[in-house]
Amino acid sequence: MEFDVAAYLKRCGEAVDGFADRAIPPENRMPGVLYAAMRYSFFSGGKRFRPALGFAAAEAVSGRGEDALPFVTAIEMIHTYSLIHDDLPALDDDDLRRGRATSHVAFGEAMAILAGDALATDAFRLFTLPEVIRSYPAQTILACLSEIAQAAGSGGMVAGQVLDILSEGKTLDMPTLEFLHTRKTGALIRAAVRCGGIAAGADEERMLPLGRYADRLGLAFQVADDILDVVGDTAVLGKPVGSDEGKRKATYPALLGVEEARRRLWCLLDEAQAAVEPFGERGEPLRALARFVGNREH
Ligand code: IPE
Ligand code: IPE
Ligand code: MG
Ligand code: MG
Ligand code: MG
């Protein structure tokens, strides 16, 4: 029977929502507008793809996806902050996200910036929650902390976003575009997979295939995002189509055309799936999530 990716994403999403609901302050606390803005963006129907990757990696290693929960919730908070800031007028200047008004449209630019700041910072507080400290060896928590801080920071996602902005209106060569994509999107995806493995206690021998899988998949995810920006449907996508062309962004379709971009996308996804063959049956969620990246419509 074909693996049910939609059900898997839903199950991981519900677990993440439960954890985050306890971690993000309620709106009736002062200053309520901050918590309202954080919650507006966090609980807005994202696919929860990165959490699902962490669950799938943990499942491949230990058989227990939930091992990844606190770490992938932190990643999803950072991902949400990155989207709020990515949509700001100073960056991509988009007004639609996950099918609703972007944070700065709904709350104003100052609150959007600050809600992003708070999500990014609070993500790191999850590592010190008593329930997390009780449940994992200190070295596991530190290893995930290091993965996530590196992936999100000045050598990872933020570096990619800087290159993305600097590249507007320019034609990049392929190695530079790949460098950009593997940072702005690949880095957090890689961290989600690796943290899943670390949380489940993977040894070096099992971290290697997970790393190979994550590298291919992280790049593939942004290639698919670039393609959807050209051929997608705003109503399904929940964000504006044609945003990249409007800003003359450096993308795979801009450089190669949609057909060649799609061919390369599936090459990466085939390589990602092959990388986790050693996990056998337990690797099926990881392989199904890779196929989902190629087939997704939002
Ligand atoms: C969109 O990420 C931004 C990129 C990094 C490509 P997703 O496609 O995972 O967005 P949500 O979380 O489902 O809204
Ligand atoms: C966003 O890339 C990557 C990050 C938010 C780090 P895009 O700008 O292509 O993402 P979308 O298309 O707005 O979701
Ligand atoms: Mg962008
Ligand atoms: Mg954008
Ligand atoms: Mg995009």
Image (cartoon, rainbow, N blue to C red):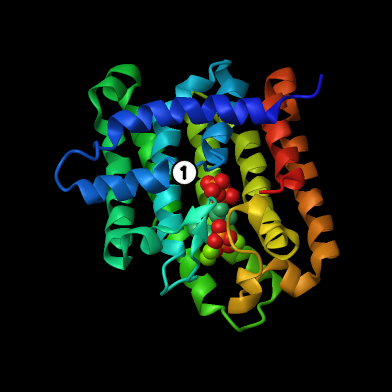
Which quadrant of the rendered structure holds the N terminus?
top right
Q: Secondary structure at mark 1?
A: loop
Identify which residue, 140 or 287, lies in the foreground: 287
Identify which residue, 268 or 253, lies in the foreground: 253
Q: Residue 111 placed where, x, y %?
A: 28, 60
Q: Quadrant of residue 213?
A: top right
Q: Quadrant of residue 139?
A: top left
Q: Residue 257 placed where, x, y %?
A: 81, 70
Residue at x 39%, y 53% (from the top left corner):
81
Q: Amino acid at mark 1?
A: Ser
Q: Is residue 243 left or right of residue 161?
A: right
Residue at x 60%, y 84% (from the top left corner):
169
Residue at x 66%, y 30% (from the top left corner):
6
Q: Quadrant of residue 296?
A: top right
| Above or below, 48 relative to 110 | above
The residue that mark 1 highlights is 44
Residue at x 74%, y 74% (from the top left corner):
255
Q: Residue 248 placed where, x, y %?
A: 62, 79
Mark 1 and ligand 1: say if the CB distance to the nearest ligand atom is below 8 Å.
yes
